[in-house]
Amino acid sequence: MQETVICSVCETPVTGNYCSNCGQKPGRSVTKLWSMLVDWMANVFSLERSVFACILKLILDPAKIINNYWLGNRGYYPSPGKVFFYGLALAALHIAYINTELLGLTMEFTGVQTQLFFWAFFFPFLTLASLAAFIPKKQPLTKHLISLTYLASSFFIIVTLIQDFLILISKDYLEGWAFFVFLGLLVIWNARVMVDSRKFSQIILYSALQALIFIILVIICGGIVYLKNPESLKINTPPEDAVESVE
């Protein structure tokens, strides 16, 4: 018969493998080097709960993960905030070791880190585009935010990793495609979440509508900022003859 222990977090008696109150797995022996390494590897490469497993499940069935979180379920899949943090970390590593371009875009804003400005600049427009495109579906703001945080972070990680691999192996690699691939994947998968119908034509229609609204918003905002202070904002894709491989 399993010994009853007291949870070190909430002080609830635990009779099974996990605390029924807070979910912690109680320790029955001190942590040793081997168990620490096994735990670390399990968290990174877990087929159920790791961020990378969550990203894979988002690709296969985005509505399941996003609706699960939106309906208030917590603790099993990584939260959208955790996936977003991984995206920020990858952006910082990319800027430090590859180049200052994110998804093939050169972005500069006075006094703000590039990876933060990238999300601060684009995410509000992605949200507005999603809200506007899916007005007929009457989806709440929170669901749009959850969906876009999960999907934008996931596709940023995927596209950036592929892009960096191609930069390292190809001397003639052109980066300008990365942002458009990212945007295309994002609007399609967001449509898969927001559209109740699984009709291909509906998904394509709403995907195109999101992309069109997003591009219009970026053009309007970029034009206003540029007119006020042309030196404060620079967003451009690298010219074909200026792209250099990383050696």
Image (cartoon, rainbow, N blue to C red):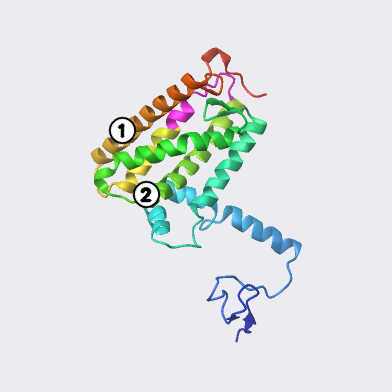
Label 2 or label 1, whichever comes before in sequence order: 2
Residue shown at the point (60%, 57%) measured from the top left? 43
Type of the residue with mark 2: Leu
The spot of residue 208 in percent (x, y) is: 31, 33
Can residue 61 be seen here?
no
Residue indicated by mark 1 = 208
- In the rendered structure, which segment of residues is drawn in magenta? 170-181
Type of the residue with mark 1: Ala
Residue indicated by mark 2 = 141
Residue at the extreme top: 241
Q: Secondary structure at mark 1?
A: helix
Q: Residues within 10 Å of mark 1 (few under 14, many from 20)?
A: some
Front one among 122 and 37: 122
- How many numbered marks have been drawn onto this rendered protein structure? 2
* Above/below status of 21 relative to 219: below
Q: Residue 21: give its label.
A: none
